[in-house]
Every structure is written in structure tokens, then in C-alpha cells.
Amino acid sequence: MAVQNPFFGKREPEPFQPRHSTVMPSGLSSAAPSAAAAAVPASAKAPAESGGSKLTVGPNIKLKGVEITDCDTLVVEGMVEATMDSRVIQIAEQGAFRGSAEIDIAEIHGEFNGTLTVRQKLVIFSTGRVSGKIRYGKLVVEEGGQLSGEIEVGVVGSGSANARPASPRPADVAAAVAA
């Protein structure tokens, strides 16, 4: 005796139910409430993440021997060996960058080793380690962060009036580390 399975038989057609779309104050329709909810926090994020081109090198990924240009934000969660001229670099706690980078803003939670020129602001978090030839406009080092190598304040050619190469005095280094 054959048993007929209802999953393979004919289905009754379901009546078409159009979605009712109402306009919300932000100009988004209620047809995609999850998209509307996701769009609001995305626009409230930092300017570095709000738009432009973004490259993320995920965990356990190794990117070696490349030149990265025209990238607004590089997020390093794996390992990158490259030359970079960009706007923002964010190195995650497990991330590592080796090579040279000329950027506007650097946020280091992981490791950077090489030549780093930061035109605006270098932020080294408590888990961050930066070594090599480092030039920066402004420096923030969280307690526990490490900075070593040939270090200069003021980026030559940045157009800033107070950009000046200088050898840091012990008081300057102690003040930067305490900040």
C-alpha cells in the first residue's frame, strides 16, 4: 500500500497578501523594519565607519606583499604585510600589520611593526604595540600600550603650522605614556 506524502502533492495556492507600507518619519518604509532599525545605528557610528571604501582582513587571514591604496578604512583582524596609503587603519587585538603605512588616523589594539606615518592622530590602546619608525601629529597612549623605535612628533609635509620634527624629551615621553 502506497502512502501519499502531502509535501510532494499539489498545494493549494495561497492568496496574495500585499504588504502595507507606511512612511516613517525618517523616510523609510515599514516594509523593512529590520533595515530601518539597522540603518539608524549605522548612521550614528563614527565617521570612519559611516561610508567610503572599507577593507577588512578577517581573523586567521594572511595578506602578504600588497600595496593598499584608495581605501578609506582598513580593519586588520588577521595578519597584513603591505605598503599602505590610506585614511584610517584599525588593528584589532589579534591583528598585526608589518610594513609601511601613511595614514590620517591609526587605532592600534594589536601590533604594528615597520614605518608608520600618521598625519593626524595615533591612538595606542592598552593591548597595542607599535614599533619601528613612527611619525605622528597627535599621540594618545592608553596605560599598558607600548611604543618603541625611532619616534618623531610632527609630520613633515602635513601643511600644519606646528608640524616639526623633534626628538622627544624624557618629560614628553612620560607625559604621553601617562595620558
Image (cartoon, rainbow, N blue to C red):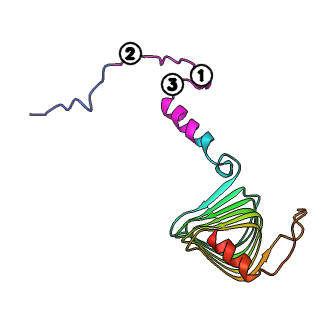
**Looking at the picture, how far across and down is residue 173, in whole percent?**
70, 78
Question: In the picture provided, is 151 more to the left or to the right than 50?
Answer: right
**Looking at the picture, how far across and down is residue 106, in whole percent?**
68, 64
Residue 150 is tagged as: none
Q: Which mark is in front, 1 or 2?
A: 1
Q: Depth check: give the residue in front, 148 or 78.
A: 148
Instruction: Give the residue drawn at x 30%, y 23%.
Output: 11
Instruction: Give the residue drawn at x 59%, y 73%.
Output: 145
Instruction: Give the residue drawn at x 49%, y 16%.
Output: 20
Mark 2 = which residue? Answer: 15
Q: Depth check: give the residue in front, 146 or 114.
A: 146
**Looking at the picture, how far across and down is residue 84, in whole percent?**
74, 68
Q: Quadrant of residue 112?
A: bottom right
Q: Secondary structure at mark 2?
A: loop
Mark 3 = which residue? Answer: 31
How far, Cα to Cα, is label 3 from label 1? Answer: 14 Å
How far, Cα to Cα, is label 2 from label 3? Answer: 19 Å
Q: Secondary structure at mark 1?
A: loop
Instruction: Give the residue drawn at x 72%, y 79%.
Output: 171
Question: In the picture provided, is 34 more to the left or to the right than 110?
Answer: left
Magenta residue check for 24: yes
Q: Which mark is in front, 3 or 1?
A: 1
Of all residues, the one furthest to the left in this rendering is 1
Q: Badge 3: few (under 14), some or many (20 or more) residues near its Cα, within 10 Å?
A: few
Q: Is residue 149 above or below residue 102?
A: below
Give the residue type that dot 2 points to.
Pro
Magenta span main SS: loop
Residue 25 is tagged as: 1
Q: Badge 1: few (under 14), some or many (20 or more) residues near its Cα, within 10 Å?
A: few
| Magenta-colored span | 13-41
| Quadrant in which the N terminus appears | top left
Do we see residue 154 in this rendering? yes
